[in-house]
Image: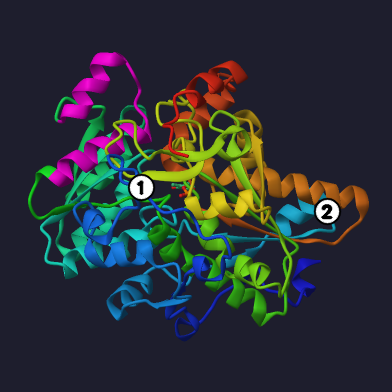
Amino acid sequence: MSKENKIPYKIYLEESEMPKQWYNLRADMKNKPAPLLNPGTLQPMTAEELGGVFCEELVQQELDNDNAYIDIPQEIRDFYKMYRPSPLVRAYCLEEKLGTPAKIYYKFEGNNTSGSHKLNSAIAQAYYAKKQGLKGVTTETGAGQWGTALSMACSYLELDCKVYMVKVSYEQKPFRREVMRVYGASVTPSPSDTTQIGRKILAEHPGTTGSLGCAISEAVEVAVSNPGYRYVLGSVLNQVLLHQSVIGLETKAALDKYNITPDIIIGCAGGGSNLGGLIAPFMGEKLRGEKDYRIIAVEPASCPSFTRGKFAYDFADTGMVCPLAKMYTLGADFIPSANHAGGLRYHGMSPVLSQLYADGYMEATTAIQTDVFEAAETFARVEGILPAPESSHAIKVAIDEAMKCKETGEEKTIVFGLTGTGYFDMVAYEKFHDGEMNDYIPTDEELAEYAAKLPKVE
Ligand SMILES: *Cc1c(COP(=O)(O)O)cnc(C)c1O
């Protein structure tokens, strides 16, 4: 049947059709995301203050709420060409398996050694650090994809790279750690005794498996205390969403080639960067009143920032050294249960997506872990790709929506972001197969305890 279809399994773009500019969604938002605040004075962070932590040009991008398009430097476009454009795949086999009239597409970002979309921003951030003449960068990594992506970008540009890796992942994913070392990065499990904040967290929570929030604090401390270093972050920040807009721009260009208009766009949400990137041009149309789409963020039930968090100013990190961001948050102290979707363990959410969600432009839902792995396997068995657990949150909800279409007979077009591959997540798949998967969902009481500790800002 599928051979007869006019739309190919994979829609590729030509190199010449790749985006030459990133799209800055903020330019089309009436309610701009709230500014980052200085944790000491509670005043908006100035470019100068941000420049102590982040690279100069990235600070400009972080603060730019007005320019809709920002040129992608030629050097970055050349690097993108090594692994982009990424394919937009029509999931014919999954549709057939589900027996759904829905048309399902996924944008696959796993075709590079880092195994995820994170390389799109890693190369941009490393490029601006190099351009500024820095020696190196520090960062945190959860599941390891961001650390790997940054290591690749840094080795390409000959920059030093210091990675603080959430301890649970460091232990569960030794191969991920070794890949980073192949690319020349130094990798330290977090919390560690190499920083003041790490020692403090270890003293207060002995035996903790760590969190992104702790690792961020350590990486920032190392950046600000070493001359020639700056800190870079793999998600949450406005600049990261900007770089990831390449995903959405390519997706839209591919769909436009065949006059396809999606009804529903789905992405998993950790800090919000892949989702923010995937939806960017579509959300732009929605904000300008040109088109309407259903946009759904999927988060793990164990770390439900959008669906059960508060929209409030909070610290971006456990150590409270970073600026305050207004976002959906579970509280900077929140440490999720040792959940395998490492990349979705962050307590907060992109301020851009938070504002859009608060204003009703998108929906959010949660998925529990065993359901996510079930969806991952259904997908792997028919589509071939072994998906990352993070990406599988989007697969789960895409399948749910396709099954609703089966009931109603509607031929909706569903697009979801397949952010990466799961080859380094086999311990999690093993737990799933052996029936040892942890489906812990925090109680209302637990969440209220953390919410009560949010900083009093407004
Ligand atoms: C990091 C990661 C995510 C989540 O991060 P976002 O910033 O929310 O996109 C999702 N999928 C994969 C494969 C990842 O590596």
Q: How many marks?
A: 2
Queried whether the magenta region covers residue 257, the answer comes back as no
- What residue is disc 2 on? 100
- What residue is disc 1 on? 37
Image spot of residue 46 (x, y percent): 28, 58
Element under label 2?
loop
Q: Above or below — where is 345 with respect to 34?
A: above
Chain-order first, disc 2 or disc 1? 1
Q: Above or below — where is 354 with respect to 1?
A: above
Q: Nearer the viewer, residue 267 or 67?
A: 67
For the record, the magenta segment spans 195-224
Dots 2, 1 in contact, CB < 8 A: no
Image spot of residue 93 (x, y percent): 72, 56
Amino acid on which disc 1 is placed? Leu
Q: Above or below — where is 113 with respect to 4?
A: above
Q: Residue at x 72, y 74 (%)?
A: 260
Q: Nearer the viewer, residue 93 or 148?
A: 148
Query: Which color scheme does this rendered protein use?
Result: rainbow
Of marks 2 and 1, the one in the foreground = 1
Element under label 1?
loop
